[in-house]
Amino acid sequence: MVAFDLETTGVDVEADRIVTAAAIHLGAEKPLKLEWLADPGIDIPEGATDVHGITTEHARKHGERAHDVVDQVAETLALRVRDGVPVVGHNMPYDLTLLDRECRRHELPTLLDRLDGAPLHVIDTLVLDQHCLPKRRRVSKDQGPRQLITLAQVYRLPWDAEAAHGSSYDALMAARIAYRIGSLAHTPRPEWPQWIRFNHRPRFHELDGLDLAQLHELQITLAAEQAAGLQEFFRKSDPNAVVDGSWPLRPREAS
């Protein structure tokens, strides 16, 4: 699989820009790790810098042209996808949609344009974890139940706080979590570790035996169901709340 992550100027997939990107091809005869730093062409807000550590000044001095980075990232993913390699990450509609909008902004072929009809198969640890452990307890009252750091803790993976929120680290951690989820799916329930068996109604076995296409289609359904449930919850306090369940790519907003 190719692990993929972006660090950006913000959380708006329609307006924000790529600052760093990583694509790590795992499981190949020659594993490949590619990283990019872009000058996004706009100021990097202080809040974004607080997350990933890249300032506007650093990006302008050391980053490549945004056009070139976007083109290279999209082509790197396309080359792997055309060979049947799935893209793995955490909360993939964010990263894939922002990459799509960046391609359009720079008048470049999108990732989907570059696939020559090959199917895009995605593995999203956010969707799979929520399905497999829907009722697990929060690790703390202050930490989001589906954050990447939370999943690392749940699946007993070491977490490096200093390296976290770097695109390479987050991409690789998502791949490790995906591997743990897949391993549990193919392990008989009596052999699951105690920290998994003690969760309420774990559902890893529902992934057992699925091929990539089936797993991808299942995640489309799961993401829509999860978004609908979250929207219902939000509407208890805001009747107009809307949660987009599109996966793995959000449709473009009407202009």
Image (cartoon, rainbow, N blue to C red):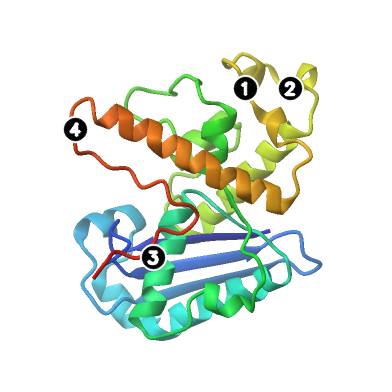
Relative to 6, say whether 182 is above or below: above
Cβ–Cβ below 8 Å for labels 1 and 2? Answer: yes
Cβ–Cβ below 8 Å for labels 1 and 3? Answer: no
- The front one of 9 and 79 is 79
Label 4 SS: loop
Q: Residue at x 69, y 31 (%)?
A: 206
Relative to 161, say whether 105 is above or below: below
**Type of amino acid at the residue the image marks with label 2:** Trp
Mark-to-mark CA distance, 3 and 2:
37 Å
Q: Residues within 10 Å of mark 1 (few under 14, many from 20)?
A: some
Mark-to-mark CA distance, 1 and 2:
10 Å
The quadrant where residue 157 appears:
top right
**Type of amino acid at the residue the image marks with label 1:** Pro
The disc label shown at residue 239, or none: 4
Please state, as top left, top right, bottom left or bottom right, where the C terminus lies in the image: bottom left
Q: Residue at x 45, y 57 (%)?
A: 166
Q: Is residue 218 visible?
A: yes
Say whether residue 127 is left or right of residue 65: right
Q: Position of residue 249 (x, y in %)?
A: 46, 59
The quadrant where residue 154 appears:
top right
In this figure, which residue is indicated by the disc labeled 2? 192
Q: Earlier along the polypeptide chain: callout 3 or callout 4?
A: 3
**Type of amino acid at the residue the image marks with label 4:** Pro
Which mark's residue is nearer the viewer, 2 or 4?
Answer: 4
Please state, as top left, top right, bottom left or bottom right, where the N terminus lies in the image: bottom right
Mark-to-mark CA distance, 4 and 1:
32 Å
Say whether residue 71 is left or right of residue 188: left
In this figure, which residue is indicated by the disc labeled 3? 98
**Type of amino acid at the residue the image marks with label 3:** Leu
